[in-house]
Amino acid sequence: MVKKIFDKNRKWVAKQLGKDEDYFSKLAKQQKPEYLYIGCSDSRVIPESIMGFGCGELFVHRNIGNLVSNTDLNVMSVINYAVCHLKVKHIIVCGHTHCGGVEAAMTAEDFGVLNPWLRNIRDVYRLHREELEAIDDEDKKKETLVEFNVREQCFNLVKVHEVQEAIVERGLNVHGWVFDIATGKLKDLEIEHKQMLKEIQSVFPKK
């Protein structure tokens, strides 16, 4: 099975060189993506494919449940590098339907080492409990929690100091999307990131 992967790699290399003989020499130069994508690790969601991007066009961070947690040095390091060094113009937090992390967080089951991670999504449920429990259809409830989770992670993103500076100083944009696995379509949640920033600054105004 592993040998097949290397066979496919050779075919892919040949295909790229057939289109452009300088493809890899260009790719080896410094990356300059305009987008940072923060999404779920789910194997059915391939960000470059669903967005129609090629190599070098998208800086990517993925984890279970597309979380932006200030205690996760991995995602914080990615955000810092993307914003401060790559100077991306857009950050996208993208959730998806039929998310195993969201579904797991909606149960009281013990998931061992995953419990502290899922607690982030369970906190989102707690924040929106009244709205969620008013939904009778279980699938609709899950989809709604996926959307609430994306919105809360965008809020967490705007809380990051580097992101705040980039929004004010150079117009960095924050987006919240949901990928519908059943249709292949992206849904824009139309996140008001500037309003989020105002809310944060009203609670913690600069001196």
Image (cartoon, rainbow, N blue to C red):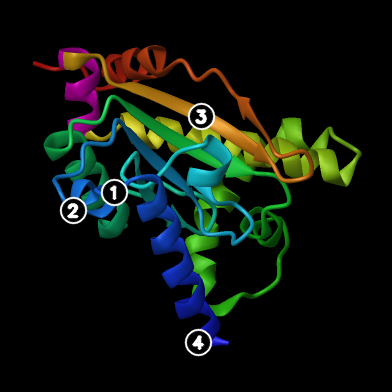
Check disc 3 and report its element: helix, strand or loop. Answer: strand
Crowd band around label 4 with a 10 angstrom C-alpha radius: few (<14), some (14–19), many (20+): few
Cβ–Cβ below 8 Å for labels 2 and 3? no
Q: Distance between the residues labelled 3 and 1?
A: 32 Å
Instruction: Point out the frontmost of discs 1 and 4.
Output: 1
Looking at this view, is 185 or 72 the one in front?
Answer: 185
In which image quadrant can residue 198 be found?
Answer: top left
Q: Which circle's residue, 1 or 4, is located before the other in the chain?
A: 4
The range drawn in magenta is 161-169
Task: List x then y, in percent, for residue 155.
Answer: 42, 30
One can see residue 129 in this view: no
Q: Distance between the residues labelled 2 and 4?
A: 25 Å
Q: How far apart are marks 4 and 3 (CA)?
A: 38 Å
**Quadrant in the picture for the C terminus:** top left
One can see residue 55 in this view: yes
**Quadrant in the picture for the N terminus:** bottom right
Q: Tell me: 142 left or right of 172.
A: right
Instruction: Point out the frontmost of discs 2 and 3.
Output: 2
Q: Which circle's residue, 4 or 3, is located before the other in the chain?
A: 4
Task: List x then y, in percent, for residue 112.
Answer: 56, 79
Looking at the picture, which amino acid does disc 1 mark?
Tyr
